[in-house]
Image (cartoon, rainbow, N blue to C red):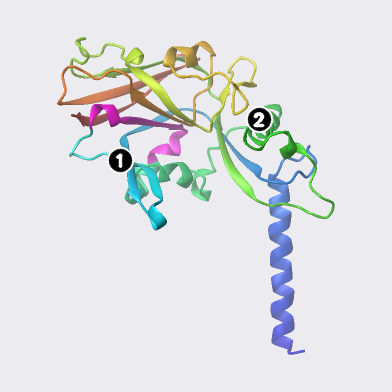
Amino acid sequence: MNPRFKLFTALALLFTLGISACSKANVEEDEEPFGGTHFHYFPRECTHILSLPMKTEQTVGYAGRVNKRDVVVGEEGVEAKDFLYWLMTGAGDLDSLEQYYSQHRGRMYEHLYHRAGFKAQVAMGIRPLEKEMIRDYRIGIAGPDAMKPAKPGVMDMNLMPWEYRVTGVKDFKIIALTPLFGLPAETSLNRFFTIHELAPKQIVSSQSKRLAWGYRSKDQVTSIDQWLAMRPTAQPVMMLRLNTMPQEVPVKTRFVAILTTEDGKDVRDTLQVLLK
């Protein structure tokens, strides 16, 4: 055999074994090797919020298939009924997304936040909660069969980044800096918003450090007050939408999201949007 080919083969084998070893270190250590996806957890403190105005855009693709994606709204504004209020929480490095990755502005931020440069501010993980999270996801998405052990000799190394926050929420409110819904500026507008999406679809209790709601839950969490009543930790990503059309439209306004942590610190962010 050609010596150069032998060297290449040996290096390829070492590289493969290295990846395998690293992957095994990131999966759920205390569980059996189940088939399907394994989580790579990203627990973080909530010290910052990033918010963007969005809407859902539809395009027709191959064979007439309709594709949907959430896009950032610019100066052109958005119909009030289509307005999506996207909120992402994180640690001090969250602002780096806007600073260094603005060309990917939008929901791509959710994926970029898993990159190596953002791992320095990951918090201490909560192991019992993490085991509960993956079980909830597997059963909620794929059913009880998802928890069956993998076939002998089969090891699935598909790692899915999984965000959660360890900071408890005492209060959360949305205000506008202009009069809206016939109310003075800076009045809480929580009742005019409905929870459109939580990503991931799990709510963690700040008291028990266990899941309060998730993929297996039959009931829906649709209001901010309902969410706050669970005494949650901050959501990695939350999307809200208006359930009432403001009488002032068309109006250009600034919305402010204010999250008060359990230790009394206010975390806030402001966005501007033209509602039509």
Whole-number angstrom distance, CA of label 1 to CA of label 2: 31 Å
Q: List x then y, in percent, for residue 79.
A: 23, 31
Tell me the crowding category of disc 2: few under 14, some 14 to 19, or many 20 or more residues within 10 angstroms, Cα based: many
Viewer-side residue, 81 vs 76: 81
Q: List x then y, in percent, for residue 156.
A: 71, 51
Is residue 104 depicted above or below 229 in this figure? below
Q: Amino acid at mark 1?
A: Val
Look at the numbered disc 1 and give the secondary structure of its residue.
strand
Q: Mark 1 near mark 2, Cβ–Cβ under 8 Å?
A: no
Q: Which residues are magenta?
A: 79-95
Q: How many marks?
A: 2
Q: Which residue is mark 2?
A: 136
Looking at the image, is mark 1 or mark 2 earlier in the sequence?
1
The N terminus: image quadrant: bottom right
The C terminus: image quadrant: top left
Viewer-side residue, 243 vs 128: 243
Magenta stretch containing residue 82, yes or no?
yes
Is residue 267 depicted above or below 34 in this figure? above
Q: List x then y, in percent, for residue 107.
A: 40, 42
Q: Which residue is mark 1?
A: 72
Q: Residue furthest front?
A: 63
Question: Which image quadrant is residue 88 in?
Answer: top left
Residue at the spot x=35%, y=51% of the render?
60
Look at the numbered disc 2 and give the secondary structure of its residue.
helix
Residue at the spot x=34%, y=43% of the render?
98
Magenta stretch containing residue 90, yes or no?
yes
